[in-house]
Image: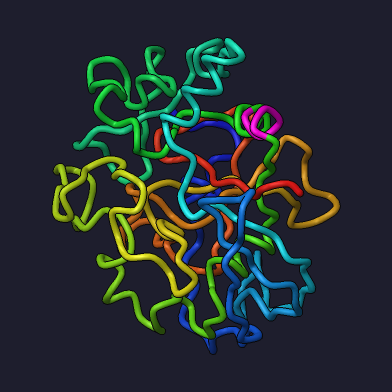
Amino acid sequence: MRPLLFILPLLTLFILRLPPQTPAQPVSCSPIPHPHPHPGFVTVPAGTYTIGKKGSLRNPLHTVHINSFPIAIYETTNRQFAAFVAATHYVNDAERHHNAMVFEPGLEEFRWIRDSTANWRWPNGITRGGIRDRMDHPVTCITYRDALAYCAWARMRLPTLEEWEVACRAGTQTDYFFGSEDSRIGEYANIWHGHDHLKADNTDGYMYTAPVGSFKPNPWGLYDMYGNVFEYCTGKLSPAESPNTAHGRGGSWWCSRNSCHSFNSYSIGSINIHASFSNLGFRVVSLP
C-alpha cells in the first residue's frame, strides 16, 4: 500500500537522485560549545551560509542567514519519548489510527506494509519486537503532529530545513560532510548495504535502527545526521505547498546506494503530516 504524498514518484523521503554537480560552498564556521542549560546540544553559530546543490530542483544552490541555535547531538530516543508519554498520557497517531507503515526483508523496492499493531512502542509491529531493549534507539512510527506535541512538552522545537542543513554540513563544502563521495558512508551512518531489500542486511550490525551515537559524528559533533532515521524539519519548499506536507532529511536505515540515497547534506523528502513510518523520527532544537 502506498500512502499519500510518500511517493515523489517513488517513496517520498526517498528522494530523486540527481547526478553529481559542483558542491555548495558554505561559509566555514566553527561551532561553539553550548553551556548549561543545554547539555547534549551543540550551538550552531549565526552566519550566512550557502546551502543546497547546483542543479537540484527541490533544493537549488542558495544563500541563507540563520541566527545561532542549539541543536541536539542525538536524535530523540524511545527513552525520551517514553518520558513524554508517561508525563502526559499522550496517545500517538499510529496508536489511534492503526496506520503505521513498516518494513520487512523480502519486499520489492519502495514497498512497505501497513501494520495495525505498529506504533512507537512496537516500531515494526508486535510480531517484530518492541522497544524494551531499544530505549536508546531513535523513536519512530510517529507523525509530524506527534513530533510537535513532544516539542511543546519538552520546550523544544524542530529545526528548520535550512538550520538542519547548516548543522549537517558543519562548515564543509561537499555533498557529504566527510567528502565528495559516499564510499565512507558506513563509518558515519546506519544505512542499508544490500543491493536490494529482498534479503535482510545486517552488514553494519543493524537491520533496523541503531542506538543513537553508534557511528562517527560530523565535524561539529552531531551524530546520525545521515542514516538511522529521517528527521522532521519545519518549513516549506514553496508558498503553494500543501499544509498537509511535512519534510524530512538525512536518510534512514532503509536507504541504500541503489534505492533512496538520501543520506547526504542536500536532499529533502516530503511526507503527509498524518503518516508514520518505521524509518522516520526527529531531533530537536532547544528554545531560549
The image quadrant of residue 35 is: bottom right
Residue 12 locus on image (x, y percent): 52, 47
The reply to whether the magenta stretch includes residue 152 is yes
User: Which segment did they paint magenta?
Assistant: 150-154
Quadrant of residue 271 within the rendered picture? top right
Which residue does the image show at 69% across and 40% down from the upper left? 245
Q: Nearer the viewer, residue 203 or 11?
A: 203
How many numbered marks are there?
Answer: 0
Residue nearest the observer in this picture, 129 or 22:
129
Choose between 31 and 117: the one closer to the eye: 31
On screen, residue 200 versus residue 210, left or right, reads left
Instruction: Report x, y in % for residue 166.
Output: 62, 70
**Residue beneath the point at 29% across and 59% down:** 215
**Vertical comparison of 187 with 112: above or below:** below
Is residue 179 placed above or below 128 in the rendered structure? below
Q: Residue at x 25, y 65 (%)?
A: 186
Quadrant location of the N terminus in the rendered image:
top left
Residue 265 placement, left or right of 50: left
Q: Position of residue 91 (x, y in %)?
A: 57, 13
Per the picture, the main secondary structure of the magenta-coloured stretch is helix
Q: Indicate the quadrant where residue 59 lies.
A: bottom right
| Residue at the outermost right position | 239
Q: Is residue 190 above or below residue 89?
A: below
